[in-house]
Amino acid sequence: MNSFLVLLAAIASASTLAAKQDQAGPYTQIGTSGDTSEASNGRLRAKLLVVPDIDAFWKAWEVSTPPQIVTTDTITHAKPVHAVIVFSGCTPGGDGQCKLSVTFAVTAPDGRPYDKETTAAAWEGPAGGDHLLASSASFGFHLETTDQLGRYQMKATLTDEISRTSLTIRKAVVAVAASGR
């Protein structure tokens, strides 16, 4: 049986979703490394982060600049992971607000879709310019005990609804046996 895929559309406070800036200036390196977890399309840039603790992500995002984010590339049956997108360069509409949507999907180790794609609002708010913003939607991925071990591919397609541009970012997570099993 497929695991349940949880869309966390928890909208945090405005301060939590505030733009983040690297100490050396606006982060402008997303999409330049050849890493499939990063992409750019015109001004829109994004990176897919896989975190082991979504609450710790938001706490770090809220209290530090630059945020000290813990990421992971493994998942166990006992511990879910969460995909979060950080981005910059969204196009503001006439009201100065950006509108982004995201579609999340997971591919199982055998190459088949793991579950249905999930679409949500990723950001509806002020443009951050070249400063990083964190999407207001994240994607929780939990393995059932019957799910196979191996490499799962998490994919997010981020669409700027104002400029009609989109990009796709991917991050692999490897399902391993939990310690003590």
Image (spheres, rainbow, N blue to C red):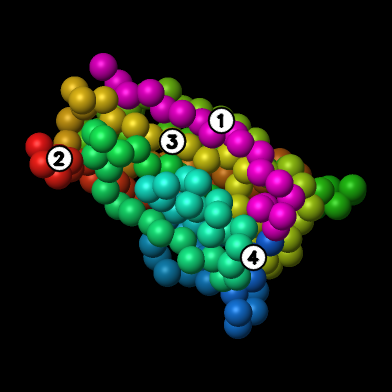
Find residue 116 and report its horizontal and vertical position in percent.
42, 23
Q: Which numbered dot is residue 119?
A: 1
Q: Earlier in the sequence, mark 2 or mark 3?
A: 3
**Disc 1 to disc 4, C-alpha distance:** 25 Å
**Disc 3 to disc 4, C-alpha distance:** 23 Å
Q: Earlier in the sequence, mark 1 or mark 2?
A: 1
Q: Amino acid at mark 3?
A: Gly
Q: Quadrant of residue 159?
A: top right
**Disc 1 to disc 3, C-alpha distance:** 13 Å
Compared with 120, 64 (above or below) is: below
**Disc 2 to disc 3, C-alpha distance:** 19 Å
Of the 4 image quadrants, the one containing the C terminus is top left
Q: Earlier in the sequence, mark 3 or mark 4?
A: 4
Q: Which numbered dot is residue 90?
A: none
- Location of mark 2 (residue): 177
- Location of mark 3 (residue): 140
Q: Amino acid at mark 1?
A: Thr
Magenta-colored span? 1-18
**Dot 4 alpha-carbon crowd within 10 angstroms: few under 14, some 14 to 19, many 20 or more:** many
Find residue 49 and report its horizontal and vertical position in percent.
44, 53
Seen at 42% across and 47% down, the residue is 53
- Location of mark 4 (residue): 20
Compared with 155, 132 (above or below) is: below
Q: Amino acid at mark 2?
A: Ala
Of the 4 image quadrants, the one containing the N terminus is top left
Residue 86 is at least partly visible in this image: no
Seen at 42% across and 69% down, the residue is 33
Q: Amino acid at mark 4?
A: Lys
**Dot 3 alpha-carbon crowd within 10 angstroms: few under 14, some 14 to 19, many 20 or more:** many
